[in-house]
Amino acid sequence: MGAEIIKKYFRGLSETQITQFEQLGLLYPEWNEKINVISRKDIDNLYVNHILHSLGIAKFADIKPGSKVLDMGTGGGLPGIPLAIMFPDVHFHLVDRIGKKIKVAQDIADRIGLKNVTVQHGDIKEVKGSFDYVVSRAVMGLDELVEAVRKCVSKTCINALPNGLICLKGGDLQSEVKKYKKTAMIADMKDYFSEPFFETKKVVYVQLI
């Protein structure tokens, strides 16, 4: 399954966006031959399990042009690169501690012509500046994640959804979210996408201003 699955759920994409999504289907498998960016057994499910999964954030939040988003623990550029294609007027800063993975993210962003992406090899503590949202694909528990990113979130809000953390997680999250029940939201991804993969997948948001 290729970029058609993206067009199924996101209408009105430009020719540039469609081409960029198609290129991901060539570039990630190419890199995966060299280093294990995505699980070898999962690379055939790239579009559903990784690209469309990343775009669950785009279904949850309509991010305004001029916003800044930090992708913490991006690995080879997920969810940051698919989101950067979807929101070409939003700046995405991708951070990861593993140098060879961040090299993949940089190369793919360059090769598909993304002008709204910067990358940083390092820890979240080394990130300078502030962001409207921090996004992440379940790199750690919610408590740890919130504490790690809180300092990176801007106090000035330009979006309808207040600034904070938006992460992709799976399974039963009630205990994790309990502490943040007044400032958190959980969205079921099965409400966005009909593929079986999304049955237990969630978008978790925590307001941080």
Image: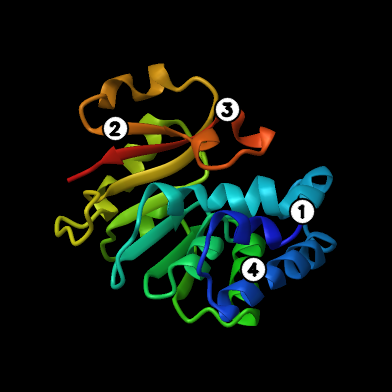
Instruction: Classify 10 Å Cα crowding around label 2: few (below 14), some (14-19), many (20 and above).
Output: some
* Amino acid type, mark 2: Ala
The answer to whether the residues at label 1 and label 4 have Cβ atoms under 8 Å apart is: no
| Mark found first going from the N terminus, 1 or 4 | 4
State the residue at coordinates (51%, 42%): 192
Q: CA distance from mark 4 to mark 3?
A: 25 Å
The mark closer to the camera, 4 or 2, is: 4
**Up-down: is 117 above or below 205?**
below
Q: Which residue is mark 4?
A: 21
Instruction: Classify 10 Å Cα crowding around label 1: few (below 14), some (14-19), many (20 and above).
Output: some
Residue 70's label in the rendered image is none
| Mark found first going from the N terminus, 2 or 3 | 2
Residue 200's label in the rendered image is 3
Q: Which residue is mark 2?
A: 184
The answer to whether the residues at label 4 and label 2 have Cβ atoms under 8 Å apart is: no
The reply to whether residue 127 is visible in this rendering is: no
State the residue at coordinates (81%, 67%): 30
Q: CA distance from mark 1 to mark 4?
A: 20 Å
* Amino acid type, mark 3: Thr
For the residue pair 71 and 148, the one nearer the viewer reads as 71
| Mark found first going from the N terminus, 4 or 3 | 4
Instruction: Classify 10 Å Cα crowding around label 4: few (below 14), some (14-19), many (20 and above).
Output: many
The answer to whether the residues at label 4 and label 3 have Cβ atoms under 8 Å apart is: no
Q: Which residue is mark 1?
A: 36
The answer to whether the residues at label 2 and label 3 have Cβ atoms under 8 Å apart is: no
The mark closer to the camera, 3 or 1, is: 3
| Badge 3 element | helix
The mark closer to the camera, 1 or 4, is: 4
